[in-house]
Image: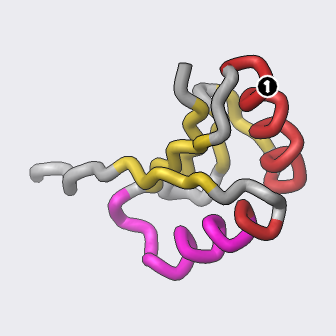
Amino acid sequence: TQVILSLSKSEDYYLGKDKILMNEIIPEINKQFKVNKTDTVFLRADFSLAYGKVARLMSFLKRGGIHKIALVTMTEDKK
C-alpha cells in the first residue's frame, strides 16, 4: 500500500484520507512506512498551490529523515 501525503487547497494535510497536523506528519509517515513496508511517500498537492508551499513541505520531509518523495501529478480542473 502506498503512503500518500496530501496538501489541500486550504493548506490542510492528509495522510491517506485522515487529516493530520503538521507536527504529526513525520511520526505518522514513519509508522505507515513500517506497516506498509515501504520508504517512499507519495506527495499530492492541490494544483492551485504555489510551488513554494510544496517545496517547503518537501524540505520539511527531508529534514525529518524522509528522503524518498514521489510527486503525484494532477491536472488542472477543467472549468
Q: Is residue 52 left or right of residue 76?
A: right
Q: Position of residue 38 (x, y in %)?
A: 64, 30
Vertical side of 74 occupied by 63: above or below: below
Are there few (<14), some (14-19), or many (20+) residues within 10 Å of tag 1?
A: few
The residue depicted at 48 percent of the width and 57 percent of the height is: 9
**Main SS, magenta residues:** helix
Q: Position of residue 37 (x, y in %)?
A: 69, 23
The quarter of the picture where residue 29 lies is: top right
Q: Residue furthest bottom?
A: 52
Tell me which colouring the rendered structure shows: secondary structure
Vertical side of 11 occupied by 4: above or below: above
Task: Identify the element where label 1 is drawn.
Answer: helix
Q: Position of residue 67 (x, y in %)?
A: 66, 59
Vertical side of 4 occupied by 45: above or below: below
Q: Which residue is mark 1?
A: 34
Q: How many marks?
A: 1
Name the foreground residue: 14 vs 70.
70
Q: Is residue 68 left or right of residue 49?
A: right
Looking at the rendered structure, the kind of residue marked 1 is Lys
The residue depicted at 36 percent of the width and 65 percent of the height is: 48
The residue depicted at 11 percent of the width and 52 percent of the height is: 79
Name the foreground residue: 76 vs 73.
73
- Segment tinted magenta in the rendering: 47-60
- Quadrant where the N terminus sits is top right
Q: Residue furthest left?
A: 79
The residue depicted at 56 percent of the width and 57 percent of the height is: 10
Q: Is 51 part of what is drawn in magenta? A: yes
